[in-house]
Image: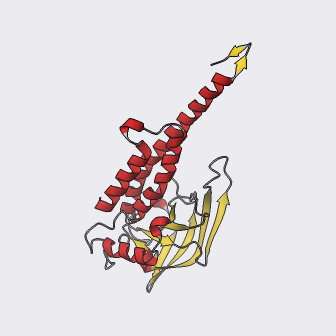
Amino acid sequence: DGPLVTVIRQDAAHQVLGDLGERPRGRNWCRHRERSRDRAQIGEAHANRDRPAGQGSGAEPGADAVGEMLERRFEDAVDRRLSIGMSEPDAGSDVAALRTTAVRDGDEFVVNGEKMWCTGAGLPNTLLAMYVRTDRDAAPRQGISLLIIDPTTPGVEIRRVPTLARHILGTNSVSLTDVVVPKQNLVGGLNDGWTVLLSGLALERVLRAGGYVGAAQATVDDALAYAKQRQQFGKRIG
């Protein structure tokens, strides 16, 4: 991993775990986890930019060059959310089975397909980080690339998926119909998206674990506080 990814991971770990002397508990775990989500997603989008220039597939520019292109194109990228699009209607845990395609057309990609469970995709100030298949003839894990897509681009349709919980951020399906994406929005090398994907998942597992531990701790804290106030048969039950 490059220096940028290392810094982001250290910062995210600090946000989730806190200092040993004052480790966040209860709802603070959830808050720390949410604050770390943006850092994790930005880390995923930048995961390969510290690799040597020119490393990658074909004649595409190196990861450093691509990272600089993205920063110029989205000057406020660090202040924006990224909604990650991996899963599809027919590709869940088996991400390598994704079918959304991006066909090169000169200096652009034309993207078609559908993504599922894109957290926060419909929120303001959010970019879409979509994993797409850029080489249908390559092995499943070798023909995937990551593109950053502006949700206001013609052909992008975002639909909220009803859920029992997680109503604040929400999750969405994203339909992509002949969506034109500049080649400068490619993150990492062409067909090198699997490497980027794994780097993001490694960090997300830590953050997600922290979030669920925090939710469980908050539940116990609330139940204990209620038990200390609740009275039955003339005395408190806890």
At 60% from the left edge and 26% from the top edge, which residue is drawn?
Answer: 224
Residue at the right extreme, as displayed = 233
The answer to whether 159 appears left or right of 76 in the picture is right
Q: Is residue 97 visible?
A: yes
Q: Quadrant of the N terminus?
A: bottom left
Q: Is residue 57 visible?
A: no
Q: Quadrant of residue 42?
A: bottom left
At 42% from the left edge and 64% from the top edge, which residue is drawn?
Answer: 45
Query: In front here: 8 or 50?
Result: 8
Q: Position of residue 156 (x, y in %)?
A: 60, 73
Q: Position of residue 203 (x, y in %)?
A: 40, 51
Q: Position of residue 235 (x, y in %)?
A: 70, 14
Q: Quadrant of the C terminus?
A: top right
At 32% from the left edge and 56% from the top edge, which residue is drawn?
Answer: 6
The answer to whether 187 appears left or right of 122 in the picture is left
The answer to whether 125 appears left or right of 1 in the picture is right
Above or below, 209 relative to 141: above
Above or below, 90 relative to 65: above
Query: In front here: 91 or 63?
Result: 63
Query: In front here: 32 or 176?
Result: 32
Number of callouts: 0
Query: In front here: 7 or 196?
Result: 7
At 38% from the left edge and 41% from the top edge, which residue is drawn?
Answer: 19
Residue at the bottom extreme, as displayed = 106
Q: Position of residue 49 (x, y in %)?
A: 33, 68
Q: How is the image coloured?
A: secondary structure
